[in-house]
Image (tube, rainbow, N blue to C red):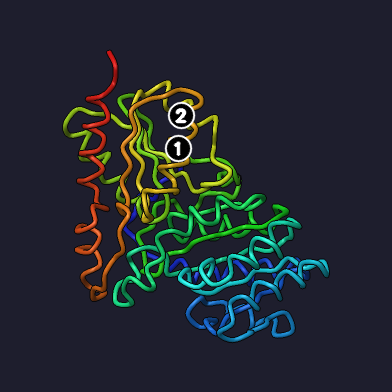
């Protein structure tokens, strides 16, 4: 069983810290590099358990990336973490040349991506990181939907050679996946079909997966049965699954907490454009900056920018109306 039947919430950052501790027990190569955000990213859990393998370099993101690269050259599996506003933003050169060009075993795990940073406002609401990182050769780009997915995808990243960019959310989020799910369900470069349907497909990542499931329930009441895919790996995108969904359902809506330019919607459009063109509607931030909001008003902020289940349902209806009969 894939989906959780209980309404439970959990913290992605806490799951990340726990996953690092578990990996550290069996793999002495695991090290962690922090950018003065170890409390917030919960990597302090790893540092408390394995202090000789924890390196806090302060507010110096370019150094953080370069030090992680050096550790990888020395044979370590280096997890480097801070906020999405600072990586990739302040260290693109180092990410490109020090990590991705030599294809080093560095895993960049960031939090506070998207609009749900809330009070920190536009300067810290990272909405262009998917497009930046997926354009760099050798980089994997992964966006977990919940804390359960984080646990399994951190393990998958540790066991997959090469550079990773993994984006976590700041808020505590509702669990999408059943706690009993196994790591076999989370293959890098694949997506998970959470609900099957033949009338259209919703492909979502991160926090938008839960909203995609809500949209599917709303559409079902209208007699529209959609397939919902958690496309947690944006790069490499699951070519076979995207093409299969295009052929079998005829229309696609994508949903992401990111600019519609260069992110998940763009990746899916690129695949279908080359393999099996179908109508696509992209739900995301429409090439604009965000704004500050109180934590308790984050859902209102998402609504203002169209990142809601209702907008996904409208996108599906519009995409289906453009299917050539």
Q: Are marks 1 and 2 in contact (CB under 8 Å)?
A: yes
Between residue 299 and residue 306, name the one nearer to us.
306
Residue extending farthest to the front is: 93
- Residue at point 57%, 72% (across, down): 81
Q: Is residue 15 above or below residue 42?
A: above
The residue carrying mark 2 is: 272
Residue 19's spot in the image, x, y percent?
59, 66
Mark 1 Cα-neighbour bin, 10 Å: few <14, some 14–19, many ≥20: many
How dense is the environment of label 2, judged by Cα within 10 Å: few (below 14), some, or many (20 and up)?
many
Residue plotted at (40% across, 48% down): 261
Q: Position of residue 221 (x, y in %)?
A: 17, 34
Rounded to the nearest angstrom, the CA distance separating label 1 from label 2 is: 6 Å
Image height of 42 relative to 269, above or below? below
Mark 1, secondary structure of its residue: helix
Residue 59, placed above or below residue 205? below
The picture quadrant where one finds residue 96 is bottom right
* Image quarter hosting the C terminus: top left
Q: Residue 2 is drawn in which quadrant? A: top left
Residue linked to disc 1: 268
Residue 83, image x, y percentages? 48, 73
Q: Which residue, as the protein is rendered here, is positioned at the far right?
A: 74
Label 2 SS: helix
Badge count: 2
For the point 48% across and 35% down, the residue is 270
Mark carried by residue 63: none
Residue 118: percent from left, percent from top: 30, 72
> Which residue is at the far top?
325
């Amino acid at each position: 069983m894939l989906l959780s039947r209980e309404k439970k919430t959990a913290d992605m950052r806490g799951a990340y810290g726990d996953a690092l501790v578990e990996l550290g027990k069996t793999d002495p190569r695991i090290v962690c590099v922090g950018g003065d955000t170890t409390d917030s990213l919960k990597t302090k859990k790893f540092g408390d358990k394995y202090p000789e393998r924890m390196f806090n370099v302060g507010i110096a993101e370019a150094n953080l990336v370069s030090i992680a690269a050096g550790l990888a050259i020395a044979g370590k599996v280096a997890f480097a973490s801070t906020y999405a506003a600072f990586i990739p933003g302040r260290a693109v050169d180092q990410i490109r040349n020090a990590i991705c060009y030599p294809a080093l075993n560095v895993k960049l795990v960031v939090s506070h991506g998207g609009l749900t940073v809330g009070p920190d406002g536009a300067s810290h609401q990272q909405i262009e990181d998917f497009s930046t990182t997926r354009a760099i050769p050798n980089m994997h780009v992964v966006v977990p939907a919940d804390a359960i997915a984080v646990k399994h995808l951190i393990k998958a990243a540790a066991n997959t050679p090469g550079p990773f960019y993994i984006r976590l959310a700041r808020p505590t989020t509702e669990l999408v996946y059943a706690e009993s799910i196994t790591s076999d369900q989370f293959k890098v470069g694949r997506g998970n079909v959470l609900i099957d349907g033949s009338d259209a497909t919703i492909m979502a990542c991160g926090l938008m997966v839960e909203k995609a499931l809500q949209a599917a329930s709303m559409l079902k009441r209208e007699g529209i049965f959609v397939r919902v895919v958690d496309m947690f790996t944006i790069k490499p995108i699951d070519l076979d699954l995207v093409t299969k969904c295009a052929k079998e359902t005829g229309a696609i809506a994508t949903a992401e907490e990111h600019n519609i330019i260069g992110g998940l919607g763009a990746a899916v459009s690129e695949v279908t454009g080359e393999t099996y063109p179908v109508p696509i509607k992209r739900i995301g931030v429409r090439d604009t900056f965000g704004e500050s909001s109180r934590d308790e008003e984050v859902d209102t902020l998402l609504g203002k920018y169209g990142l809601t289940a209702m907008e996904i349902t409208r996108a599906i209806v519009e995409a289906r109306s453009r299917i050539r009969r």
